[in-house]
Amino acid sequence: MLVAGFPAGSFQTNCYVVASAAGEACVVVDPGQDAVEPLEALLAEHRLTPVAVLLTHGHFDHTFSVAPVCDGHDVPAWIHPDDKDMLADPMKGMSTQASAFFGGRIELREPKEVRTLADGGSLELAGLTLGVAHTPGHTEGSVIFTTPTEEGVEVIIAGDTLFAGSIGRTDLPGGDFAKMQASLRDKILTLDDSGVVLPGHGPTTTIGRERASNPYLQDLGTPAPGRGM
């Protein structure tokens, strides 16, 4: 499996490409602010052809470039229905402070084709089987994607549900700390320790490392953190 990525824009949101190998079809995950040019360079470097864009949630730092990427390659975007409205109205997911910073208005639009994700479903894309798990808490429509490597190690594309040493903030519109706790308990801690976590921000980690050292997994009653947009 080929997994490559880069931090995009002022929020340093991780944009990933995932493929079975170089020179093959791929999926693009979370093309955020200013992601178009570095993404095109990454696709050219590995000779990859996108067949879909996957969105871990609807916050604009993860979706900013979804329309130009999807429409430019004539591919659909996949997002959970609870976050779909944020594609065209990103202010729905922003804090009052962030909204004021952007003058109360950010103009985005949906791609030409948007498809919705279902909890417990799977996607057969680019020669990969990607499991979908709904993980509300950071947003109502947050999801994680999982796919096994040939060696049997699972890759977990975690968005802003889980970070190295932290978890996603729950104080934005649509956030819910109780739902985040349930998602972490039922969807994250049930994964194998060998699973490699690709978070929405920051460095890669593993389920085992986070199970052992992440304070928000050690004690799910810990007050909500402030990571993510």
Image (spheres, rainbow, N blue to C red):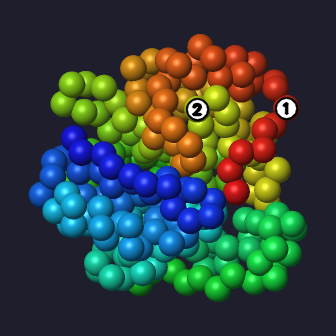
Compared to residue 99, the image places residue 172 above or below, namely above
User: Would residue 205 be found to the left or right of residue 94 on screen?
Assistant: left
Judge whether residue 82 can be spotted in this image.
Answer: no
Tally of numbered discs: 2
Question: Mark 2 falls on what kind of element?
Answer: loop
List the residue tagged with mark 1.
223
Q: Residue at x 49, y 30 (%)?
A: 205
Asked whether residue 96 is in view, the answer is yes
Give the residue drawn at x 43%, y 37%.
156
Check disc 1: other Cα within 10 Å, few if <14, some if 14-19, many if 20+.
Answer: few
Q: What residue type is labelled 1?
A: Pro
Horizontal and vertical percent for residue 22? 15, 52
Q: Which mark is residue 15?
A: none
CB of mark 1 within 8 Å of CB of mark 2? no
The answer to which of 156 and 40 lies nearer the viewer is 40
Q: Position of residue 147 (x, y in %)?
A: 32, 39
The quarter in which the N terminus is drawn is top left
- Look at 33% across and 82% down and name the residue there: 72
- Residue 132 relative to residue 106: left or right: left
**Residue under pointer 2:** 164
